[in-house]
Amino acid sequence: MAHVELSLSGAFVPQARTPVESEFVSNIDRWAATVWQAVEPCLVIDVNSTVVAVSPSGSELLGLGKGAEVVGKPLLGTLRLIDFTAGAGDLTDQEIEKIPPLLAMSSERMARGLLRIQPPGDERPVTVDAITTPLLENGRVVATLTFFAAIRY
């Protein structure tokens, strides 16, 4: 049998700590900083559907050009979302409400779905699988984070 001695003379006393600078950074800013550096195609929009951050690969996949140029612009003014018909018509307001980045915001739950995007110019439409999670601060949705995967056919 082993013998173990515990010393009570050097008892642990928690030290008062000062807040670390990162405790003052908002959740949306943390995620935006992560998205800017991400290898995966992803995007953060705020509650006004304004683009906060987009990864370089996300910008390329979605045909957004340079990501920094779309920050502060409305997502729906930046992306042209089209339907899956042969005519590739614009989405109705009712269909737009159901795209994952907006649905996750309104439902306060994760959302997933396919999006068809018409890049600027005469480029062929891009179909992506979008998975979105709401970003919370103080129990309220303040933004959404969406990851994209190209659908190749």
Image (spheres, helix red, strand yellow):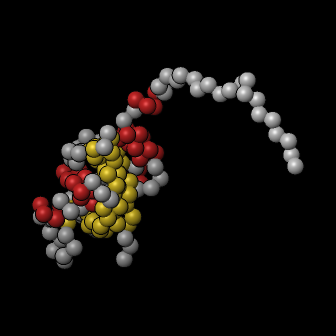
Q: Position of residue 130 (x, y in %)?
A: 33, 62
User: Is residue 69 visible to us here?
Assistant: no
In which quadrant is the C terminus drawn?
A: bottom left
Nearest to the observer: residue 84 or residue 60:
84
Total labels: the figure holds 0
Taking the spot 20% from the left edge, 66% from the top edge, the residue there is 82
Q: Is residue 106 left or right of residue 152?
A: left
Taking the spot 58% from the left edge, 26% from the top edge, the residue there is 14
User: Is residue 47 visible to us here?
Assistant: yes
Residue, far right: 1
Q: Is residue 107 left or right of residue 152?
A: left
Q: Position of residue 89 (x, y in %)?
A: 14, 69
Nearest to the observer: residue 121 or residue 26:
26
Occupied quadrant, residue 81: bottom left
Occupied quadrant, residue 131: bottom left
Nearest to the observer: residue 54 or residue 120:
54
Q: Is residue 137 left or right of residue 48?
A: right
Taking the spot 34% from the left edge, 66% from the top edge, the residue there is 129
Taking the spot 27% from the left edge, 60% from the top edge, the residue there is 100
Q: Is residue 85 above or below residue 122?
A: below
Q: Position of residue 32 (x, y in %)?
A: 38, 42
Q: Is residue 97 left or right of residue 19?
A: left
Q: Position of residue 71 (x, y in %)?
A: 29, 42
